[in-house]
Image: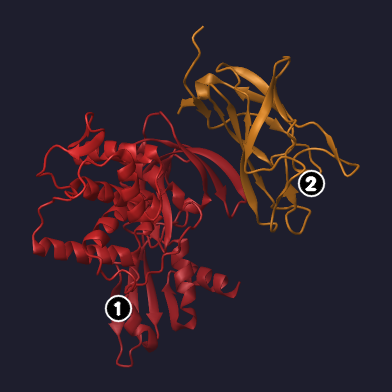
Chain colours: A orange, B red
Amino acid sequence: MKKSTKSYLFPHVPNEGISDNPTLLRITITPSFTKVDFGYSTFNSIYNNGGWIQISPETYMRERNGKKVYKLLNTNGISFSPNKHYFESQRDWQFYSLYFEAIPQEDGVYEIIEPEFMEDKEEISAAHHVSGENFDFFNIQIDMVKAVQI
Amino acid sequence: MPVTKNPYLRYKAIDARLRNRQKPLPTLLDLIQACAKETDFEPALDTVVKDIKNMRISFHAPIEFNYTKKAYEYTDDTYRFDGVGLLDQDISSIKNAIELIQSIGSSRVSGQFEHAMEKVLTAYREKFPQGDFKRQFIQTDAPRDFRGFEHFDLFFRAIKDRIPVSIVHYSYSKHRFTSRIIHPMLLKEFDNRWYVVAYSDEHNEIRTFGFDRIHDPVCVQAEFRGEQGPDAVAYFQHIYGVYPIENQELQQIIIDIVPQELAYFRSYPIHESQKFVSVQNSGRARIELNLIPSFELIRLLRSFGNSIRIVEPVWLRNEVKENYNR
């Protein structure tokens, strides 16, 4: 089968996150990677300075009910743990992107999972540890009808 | 642009070396040395090969490689690298314009324009080294490197070629990110800030988006719907600023001003609709504006403090007072 050379952007992607902060904003599927854009606001953070964010390099994307796993390749705007991106206040925000291996350019349902990890013997889960909330996103619906080519 | 990276200086050096009758037929190494002497930085061999190619394509330079002597030469002695026929009067006008742009700062407009201007300025400095470059004689209020200005070229192209753009927008007031497809129609500068005015699919109307709130704009292949809304320039005709207050129509605004402010309102009208209704002997005056009220108008009126009094509409008077006391 001839491999697609096209790239598609999904401006709106239905999904179920643990909370709406961070928000999964957009997904771009190219022949060589999948880019997932997120936005995080420190508004209402429990930390006076807004806290910090990071992402585990072990984070992955997977098909729902499937075995196929797509590894995290790179990030932009967020640091791999143990490094952190620190905020300055409760009025701060950060746009960031996670780059995974390329998922198929066809309809599908996916999940993004950040495994729990240990830091300084204290168990911390999720990218947005400041609030103790989990980063995972479920039921990410890729519907090719809703894609625009870029 | 650092002088070491400026290709035009190298082109000049290559041109001069090829034209040197004392040492004809320079080799590639001779050309590299000529560039190094001109820029105090030795360019890579590939760079000079590309420069020669660019000179041939962009400037129709008749540079040929002489395989017998393994050297470069001009095959047309009449060719002039900078041979544009300008009269003294033309040169004088261009000098003035260039020095003006230099003073204002070409980066105020866009990265591409700055790059283009750098080429012109380099050529100009070459030709007129006595030019008045170091002395700044105009100071503008434009801050450099503010957030989002890097989007200028993308939106400029999107408007020109009618291309929809996917953006991520962060609302300062709602503290919330949203992903949108917009159809850019106009770039607008107000109060030293840049905005893109666009038809928004999500809102089904024209909206204004500050560059500083936009993240990662991407041009997309979709139908352009920018023509669906009203003309973008006409849209701003009755607005002071960029963000009109929702559900407010074009309306008459009457303001009394103290004598001390009269000269300022005469010199710098708030809007083209501003008219003086009355001016008393003391200098106390009443002006009238016809505008769709905007957040920027409220901010401006508040900045006058007790020097003005809004007569009508009452809601605007209360709004300004409320903001002022906040």
Which SS class for mark 2?
helix
Front in this rendered view, residue A63 or B126: B126
The answer to whether residue B318 is above or below residue A145 is below
Which SS class for mark 1?
helix
Would you say B203 lies left or right of B93 here? Answer: right
Would you say B216 lies left or right of B155 here? Answer: right
The answer to whether residue A89 is above or below residue A65 is below
- State the image coordinates of residue A72 (x, y, percent, origin top left): 68, 29
- State the image coordinates of residue B66 (x, y, percent, origin top left): 21, 32
Label 2 crowd bin: few (<14), some (14–19), many (20+), radius 10 Å? some
Report which residue position mark 1 lands on.
B267
Report which residue position mark 2 lands on.
A131
Q: Are marks 2 and 1 on the same chain?
A: no
**Whether residue B130 can be seen here:** yes
Q: Chain of mark 1?
A: B
- Residue at the image point whose x is 51% and y is 24% from the top: A146
Considering every residue shown, the one lying at the far bottom of the view is B282
- State the image coordinates of residue B131 (x, y, percent, origin top left): 25, 68
